[in-house]
């Protein structure tokens, strides 16, 4: 869980900013004052930056919104350690400081926003019914309540400055331009196709176990004793309970998926919808792109057979998987080198999740099992009290081999990890895979044992022979390419390789290389080459490839003509974003060195952070 959150930390922080920005910016104008050390700051002052106060209410609200946004993005438990890994207090203070600096720069440039415009924005963001209508009753209640007038005034002023920053960003973004030649170069980069001419040096051609001496085999065995051991194995008793999704929960998510499918069929860009709506963090940033896959391949947060029956360009009705509901668009179909059909698709994922209350209810129930089992002296009796069954597993190793027939495939890894990290003679605390909670009791152990050289001799010989063969293939390829000559000259020096020469079919940057596979190092290098350049060498799946650029496909004017408007729009958006980001760094980074934090203002304390 922690690894997943950290992996997407940057993306989530951007999302946090999007949530925070419309609501709060600052209170009042920008007063410059001289400040001493952070410990001397006022209680109502979270800090200072370049002589400007950072109001405590603004900082605290920003930190709270960041915390809630992280929790909302992940349906699993979010622990104190996870939240601390985001350094929310530091991020919130830095965010507030950046916005203050940008608003000051906007004022310096003569930009302004009227109070009436700020009022309209506050009404739109904070006083709108679920149907999208202005809630006049709630607004009038706030306006006519003297106790809340100060809050409303602060909110109005905050929104006025937020709009001011937005105007500044629009001004900077308006400087972006995309020239025709830029668009053509980018199109050629993204869609250009090449052929490569190559020679594979397969380690199998260098494999000769018979040349290995007993001394070499013994040395390899002694240097790799851990490789030649029986795996440590365990048996456990398992009790599990699933939080079952209700029809109402499923229907609510299905409605969202159906609305997305309707928008896509009405002509909205599918990739943009995926970026806006998809809960798949791995693909949403790339327009829901899943790449090419076959029906028997594993794709994160997706099941390939969901595309069964879909034609190229077709947008599916919502289809359900264990992850939720998917809206799918098949972009392309082709046959790979083995004759299998490969499909390139995009999807928009709408995750299904039970309510936090029901998750907590099942968690609380499972939390009582360890204590009840200890008091009764029996996990079976404790489970029976709750109407639950106890499963006994066969022996399994750390990777979960042996568990496949006992638990769901998605839970094999986590059950194995818990079993090998839990040595007490007691029932474990509950843990979960998706919406199923588990407790386990280790019932038997088999320790790892060293396999004797005599028993492992055949495997040792095969392992060492394969290592030597890989080294020999690599060394041969390095020797042949060290003179930096074209492939034909290499073949003149090594005529025995001429019968191995192959020329690929055309492929682009997204494709697998026909008969080779998704060899990204080879592809990246080949696309940078020109015909006649010296041959290069890369290792892919233990095979050493000597290769050169054979042919670059012609520029497709017709395809470019159809794609150029969308391409230029995307490039312009990217340029605007780049200009704005560079401008923000230039304006804020020098002054962030002056940022001071009031240590007395503490927003997040571990005991205040409950799990979801």
Image (cartoon, rainbow, N blue to C red):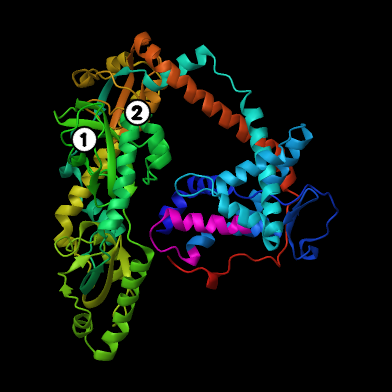
Residue plotted at (71% across, 41% down): 115
Q: Which structural element holds mark 1?
A: helix
Q: Which label sits on residue 522?
A: 2
Residue plotted at (61% across, 42% down): 121
Percent x, y of residue 516: 24, 29
Residue 20 sits above or below residue 505 on the image = below
Q: Which structural element holds mark 2?
A: helix
Res 301 visible: no
Q: Quadrant of residue 152?
A: bottom right
Residue 498 sits above or below residue 122 on the image = above
In the image, which residues are magenta?
61-81
Residue plotted at (18% across, 27% down): 337
Instruction: Left or right? Give the position of 113 relative to 556.
Output: right
> Are the two marked residues, 2 and 1, in contact with CB atoms closer than 8 angstroms?
no
User: Is 490 covered by the magenta stretch?
Assistant: no
Give the CA separation, mark 2 to mark 1. 22 Å
Asked whether 414 or 228 is in front, the reply is 414
Asked whether 560 or 273 is in front, the reply is 273
Nearer the N terminus, badge 2 or badge 1? 1
Q: Quadrant of the C terminus?
A: bottom left
Residue plotted at (36% across, 70% down): 360
Closer to the eye: label 2 or 1? 2
Percent x, y of residue 188: 41, 17
Instruction: Left or right? Give the position of 412 relative to 360.
Output: left
Q: Quadrant of the N terminus?
A: bottom left
Q: Main secondary structure of the magenta part?
A: helix
Residue carrying label 1? 206
Q: Quadrant of residue 358?
A: bottom left
């Amino acid at each position: 869980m922690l690894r997943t959150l950290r992996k997407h930390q940057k993306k989530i922080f951007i999302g946090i900013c999007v949530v925070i920005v419309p609501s709060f910016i600052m209170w009042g104008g920008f007063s410059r004052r001289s400040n001493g050390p952070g410990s001397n700051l006022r209680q109502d002052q979270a800090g200072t930056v370049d002589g400007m106060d950072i109001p405590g209410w603004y900082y605290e609200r920003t930190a709270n919104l960041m915390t809630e946004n992280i929790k909302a993005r992940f349906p699993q438990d979010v622990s104190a350690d996870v939240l601390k890994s985001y350094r929310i207090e530091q991020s919130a203070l830095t965010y507030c400081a950046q916005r203050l600096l940008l608003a000051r720069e906007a004022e310096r440039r003569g930009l302004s926003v009227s109070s009436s415009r700020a009022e309209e924005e506050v009404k739109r963001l904070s006083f709108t019914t679920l149907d999208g209508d202005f809630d006049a009753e709630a607004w009038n209640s706030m306006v006519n309540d003297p106790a809340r007038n100060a809050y409303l005034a602060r909110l109005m002023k905050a929104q006025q400055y937020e709009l001011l920053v937005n105007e500044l960003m629009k001004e900077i973004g308006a400087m972006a331009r995309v020239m025709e030649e830029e668009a053509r170069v980018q199109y050629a980069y993204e869609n250009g196709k090449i052929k490569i001419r190559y020679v594979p040096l397969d380690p199998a051609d260098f494999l000769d176990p018979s040349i290995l001496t007993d001394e070499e085999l013994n040395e390899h065995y002694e240097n790799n004793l851990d490789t030649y051991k029986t795996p440590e194995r365990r048996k456990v008793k398992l009790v599990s309970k699933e939080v079952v999704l209700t029809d109402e929960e499923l229907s609510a998510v299905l409605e969202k998926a159906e609305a997305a499918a309707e928008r896509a069929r009405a002509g909205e860009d599918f990739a943009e919808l995926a970026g806006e709506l998809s809960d798949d963090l791995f693909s949403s940033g790339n327009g829901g792109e899943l790449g090419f896959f076959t029906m028997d391949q594993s794709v994160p947060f997706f099941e390939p057979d969901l595309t069964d029956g879909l034609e190229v360009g077709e947008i599916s009705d919502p289809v359900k998987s264990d992850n939720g509901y998917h809206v799918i668009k098949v972009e392309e179909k082709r046959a790979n080198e083995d004759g299998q059909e490969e499909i390139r698709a995009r999807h928009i994922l709408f995750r299904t999740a039970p309510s936090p209350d029901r998750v907590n209810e099942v968690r609380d129930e499972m939390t009582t099992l360890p204590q009840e089992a200890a008091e009764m002296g029996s996990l079976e009796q404790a489970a029976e009290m709750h109407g639950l069954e106890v499963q006994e597993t066969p022996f399994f190793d750390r990777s979960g081999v042996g568990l496949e027939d006992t638990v769901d495939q998605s839970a094999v890894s986590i059950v194995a990890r818990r079993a090998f990290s839990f040595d007490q003679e007691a029932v474990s605390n509950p843990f979960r895979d998706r919406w199923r909670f588990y407790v386990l009791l280790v019932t038997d152990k088999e320790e790892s044992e060293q396999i004797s050289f005599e028993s492992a001799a055949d495997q040792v010989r095969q392992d060492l022979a394969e290592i030597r063969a890989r080294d020999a293939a690599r060394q041969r390829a390095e020797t042949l390419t060290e003179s930096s000559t074209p492939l034909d000259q290499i073949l003149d020096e090594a005529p025995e390789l001429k019968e191995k020469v192959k020329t690929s079919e055309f492929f682009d940057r997204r494709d697998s290389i026909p008969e080779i596979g998704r060899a990204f190092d080879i592809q990246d290098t080949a696309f940078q080459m020109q015909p006649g350049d010296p041959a290069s060498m890369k290792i892919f799946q233990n095979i050493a490839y000597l290769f050169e650029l054979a042919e670059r496909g012609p520029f497709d004017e017709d395809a470019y003509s159809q794609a150029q408007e969308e391409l230029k729009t995307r490039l312009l958006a990217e340029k605007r974003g780049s200009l704005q980001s560079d401008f923000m760094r230039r304006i804020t980074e020098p002054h962030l060195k002056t940022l001071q934090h009031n240590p007395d203002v503490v927003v997040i304390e571990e005991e205040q952070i409950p799990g979801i």
